[in-house]
Image (tube, rainbow, N blue to C red):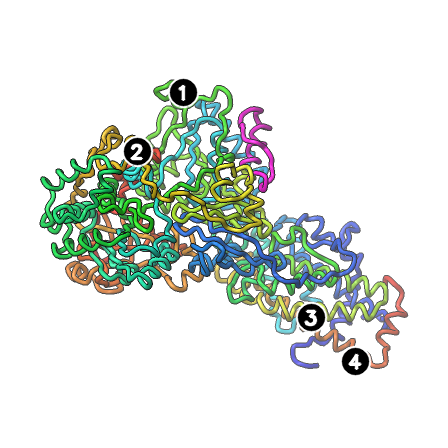
Amino acid sequence: MTNLNGATLIYNGLYAIFSARENVYAHLAKSFYGSFVPNALREEINFLIDYAALIGDSGRELTTAVGCYCEAAGNIISENTDSLEFEYNRLFVGPARLIAPPYESVYRTATRLVMGETMFDVKRAYREIDMEIRNTLREPEDHIAIELEYLAELQKRCLTALEEHDIHELRRIVNLEITFLEDHLLRWVPEFCQRIKEGSRMDFFKALAEVLVLLIKKDHEILEGLTVTLDRDEENTFSVNLSQTKKGG
Amino acid sequence: MGEGKADIGDILQRAAELNISRRSLLKGGMALGGLLALSGCSMLERSYYKSTPAIAEGPAQEFLSACPRNCFDTCSMVVSVKNGVIRKVAADPRNTFTGNSLCVKGYAYTNKVYDPNRIKYPMMQTPRGSGNWKRISWDEALDTIGKKILDLKDRYGSTLPVCMNKYSGNFNIWHYCVEGLMNSLGHISLVMGTPCWPAGIDAQGYDYGFMWNTDPEDFVKTKHFMLWGVNPAWTSIHTMKFINKAREQNGAKLVVIDPICTATASKADLYIQIRPSTDGALALGMARYILDNNLHDRNWLEKNSKGFPEFADYLKKNVTVDWASKTTGVPKSVIEQVAREFATAKPACTWIGYGFQRHINGGQSVRNVDALAAMTGNATRPGGGANYGHLATWGFNYHAMVMKQPEGSIGVESPDGKMTHRNINMNNFGRMVLEAKNPPIKMLWTACRNTVSQDPDAPIVKKALDSLEMVVVVDHSFTRTAQMADIILPTTTHFEHPGVNVSYWHYWIAAVEKCIEPLYESKTDLEIAWALSKKMNQLQPGSCTYPTEGTLAEWTEKEINDGINKLFGIKGWKDLAKKGPQKAHFPNPGYSDNKFKTPSGKYEFVSETAAKDGHPALSLYKEPMPIPKDYPIRFITPHSRTAIHSQFQHNPWMMAIFPEPYLEIHPDLAKEKGIREGDMVRVYNDLGEVRIKAKFTRVVPKDVIAGYENWFWKSDFNLNNTVKAIPADMGKRNTGNPGIAFHDNFVNIEKA
């Protein structure tokens, strides 16, 4: 076991966690944007494997799901990627009726339409960190990939806060993440992923859906745990330690 | 540690031990966030706003609009938009025909605009019909299409292998840019005609010079309504208001004549279930009774009509009330009663529906009803009339449509030596595409149209599409036609562009304002025309004469001319948008001045124009289509209350009230065929079949079944599978091709 003092341990640990989470969310965002480059896919799946190992997936659910995803991706790589694109379009783009519309508002509003009230909450969340989408007013802003990209962006902000030893900013961002997961992804992603699992003709997308739904649940637990750790820091040792740590660990 | 919270201590320990650092995760020093940015699929970016401006929570903005569907009512609308999203679509009561309400379809418009299933991006399907769709850029789409057009031109020496099928998906005036774009490519195979109303238009043309219905708001003056083969309770609910008002205020009587006891019929004082396609006999029987009883308006007839003596002579020699009764199945006493009441009420109004004339004798039957209205002096009385429709408010420039072919374009040589488009009959589209030779048809461009759902001979239309090298579909819904496309191009809804609309029934004009940004990558048909022209000219300079750019607002303005300005008291489109909907100031609406556009200037019982076109000069009776022995049941396929053709039905609100198609069948017929309520019925003839659930009802006679025309996305239900491309008797003169006898659709049935 590496011998680390408390401050270095915390700094390095947090750094590793936020880095891993950024990679994981960025990869998922990319997949739901429909970008499938076989080599990149294979490499990026390692992020998921690493992350599952890192968080010590006790029920092994996530590890199993990541394993299936890895296997399905492995099969795809040898195949024609066209079939992946056709299936992606069948599920999320059209022009035929969508198997799983990738927009939150469809699952969250009574009329099941895009650009409903909940999309504006999502938009507000983006705006709160000075982000907005290209093509605003033309594309629904609560597309799953954009929401995942937003989460990836938040990890970047966490890392910056960490590097700048700004514990308050770190707490703020972590709270934003928790709120966003609770108010948005956790509310609609289960139904969205269920539709993918039921309607997709390809194992790859079924596995991707399983990974996504488990990951956000697991990730929420991590964040909750993290706030507990941050809140327990009654004597401010955490912050002190953190600020004593040299940048770069 | 509470439930659902991870023990972060362990994780931190592990993480630190893994010694993961920001750098070590990176390959080649790439910034982490670059994963998305480098892959080119990031959508989020730094806001241009310095701080974090709240999303404007101001009051909703209101925009003017008009429903552009192929509907009598063409409602004026007010659209509320908040934060760039439509929140509500409501009626604009300044249009007194629209009044305070839209119809169920109009209220459901937000469901159309924000339907997650809307077509969003240009896409290509390989192979056609496989369901394998790739997203492509607009540039790639137009490049592929442009190259195909040039390739065909090269191979066949003209653009005649290119076919265009466009009709009534959107009646905004500049939507005729689709025709304009095709005109600009050269002479093509142009789908001409209309499935709706051609026979009636020609019939009224022979009698009146041209159709021009009375102002439907004047229906409040009416004392007696005879609604003939029309179901406004479903298809023109705003007109029902005026009919109801006349009944309340004047005690007007409502008579409905229809083979089906419709929702309108159920509200009538008298409902006459007529044997289908014998309407002419009923009109002539009444005419004979009126003549015999001296109830006709001699004064009006003398002054304003031509050929009444011949008509009277025909009635005396060939028509009796007994004959009419036997032919139509309507009791003699009823014919006499209605004839007397109709002739003595002033004004008395007839309204001839479009379903009425979808028979092989449809046009002639319209002439028979026209004659009845004319002989009672009601032809031109405000609140009277033989009402069918009008185009009196449609005198626009059609600037987007009228384009010249490139120099030296080769087409079909007409008798006067001029080159023209090849006329493809819209009502025989499938067969004409398949049979086109020298050159054959190889490509289809279709917009504002769902030919696979809506055309007769549905199985043959599919074959025709299969035979082509390229099918391009412009739409916002994934229609049956779109399913058979190689390239699909997403277009805007009418809330996403400016425009202007008028009605073929009421007398109003309404500006359509752009309420929201076009969603996704959708473009207007006009922008598509500009873009394709630009592409064509890049590929081969001079190959397309259509302008390559413009602004939608300017092009909308260019549709308005002095005539329109004067008629509606406006100064252009912008002024109309400022003022709101305006009503036409006709000095004499609906021929109320008794000046007709016929050769004689009078109402013509005897029309030499009709004779010249190969029809009887006189308004005499034309026999219905004989009932085929093997297919003795008539299958009528009227409009639904939750759809206009294939539009609207797939909207979830419509699906909630009308979840699946049903077949109206008389219990006696069902019993004979061993069909129970709720059984699936196979409706078939030698062309094709439809499977549809039986619903027992006595609204249909025993030898007629009815199914309502709709597109249910969940099934391949298509009522046109058994409809043959049998032409109606008239329509060629005014619409380019005869109408289609949709309701001369004979079938047999069995339990499926």
Kindly tell me whether residue B129 is visible in this rendering.
Answer: no
Q: Nearer the viewer, mark 2 or mark 1?
A: 2
Q: Front-most of B68 and A210? A: B68
Secondary structure category for the residue under label 1: loop
For disc 2, the neighbor class at 10 Å (few under 14, some 14 to 19, many from 20) is some
Q: Do the CB atoms of the residues marked 4 and 3 lie less than 8 Å apart?
A: no
Image point 27% across, 47% down: which residue?
B378
Tag 4, which chain?
A: A
The secondary structure type at the circle numbered 2 is loop
For the question of whether residue A132 can be seen, the reply is yes
Q: Specify the farthest residue to the front.
A: B299
**Chain under numbered label 1:** B
Q: Which mark is residue A178?
A: 3
For the residues labelled 3 and 2, the Cα–Cα distance comes to 80 Å
Task: Give the crowd class for mark 4: few <14, some 14-19, many >=20 residues within 10 Å.
Answer: few
Report the front residue among B584 and A177. Answer: B584
How many angstroms separate mark 2 from mark 4 (CA)? Answer: 97 Å
- Of labels 2 and 1, earlier in sequence is 1
Q: Which residue is mark 4?
A: A232
The mark found on residue A241 in the picture is none
Instruction: Give the label on residue B418, or none.
Output: 1
Residue at mark 2: B601
The kind of residue tagged 4 is Arg
The answer to whether marks 3 and 1 mark residues whose Cβ atoms lie closer than 8 Å is: no
Q: Chain of mark 2?
A: B
**Magenta span includes B696:** no
